[in-house]
Amino acid sequence: MQEKIKNLGLAEQLIAGGGILMFIASFLDWWHFSASVETISISGGYGAWGLPGSIWSTLAVLVSIVLAGIVIATKLGNVQMPALPQNVTWGQVWGGGAAAVVVFVILKAWRIQAAPVGSFGIGFWIGLVATVAIAYGGYLLYTKEKAAG
């Protein structure tokens, strides 16, 4: 197994690692808030599955998991993926999936900024690192396929 992991290219490592990191980050606080009313203080937070804008972070996590799952299944589990429809390539799948994760995380950030209270939590920042890894891995696979013709 360790030998198979070493045989992964940089792009595959970035996507698989980014997907796993995104899944872990999804359970940490993406939005943290604290409020005080006279002598009462309330603080808390929500992970990627919670408010604000839960749909965007949920989609980002799910797409990340799917991309990582494809890499892990095909490269480590020797699974053969089905043929894609005509005019669709795996490079486009990687590039489009990575772009979708970036867009969803940007939309989540927009919703966090629009919240009347609170700010970004540690889970968001870890998710952002995972997003960059997935985006770069997807870009590498897309450009590799484009260069090959």
Image (cartoon, rainbow, N blue to C red):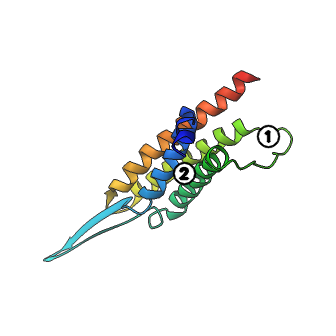
Q: How crowded is mark 2: few (under 14 residues within 10 Å), some or many (20 or more)?
A: many
Is 101 rendered above or below residue 133? below
Q: Do the residues labelled 1 and 2 touch (CB within 8 Å)?
A: no
Residue at the location (44% across, 67% down)?
A: 51
Residue at the location (70% across, 29% down)?
A: 145
What type is the residue that disc 2 sits on? Phe
Report the side of 118 relative to 37 (left or right).
right
Instruction: From the image, state whether disc 1 or disc 2 is nearer to you.
Output: 1
- Find disc 2 in the rendering and name its residue: 104
- Find disc 1 in the rendering and name its residue: 88
Is 119 rendered above or below residue 98? below
Q: Residues within 10 Å of mark 1 (few under 14, many from 20)?
A: few
Image spot of residue 74 (x, y percent): 67, 46
Report the side of 63 relative to 91 (left or right).
left
Using the numbered discs, state the Cα–Cα distance from disc 1 to disc 2 in whole angstroms.
22 Å
Residue at the location (66% across, 27% down)?
A: 144
Looking at the rendering, which quadrant does residue 115 occupy?
bottom left
Image spot of residue 68 (x, y percent): 58, 49
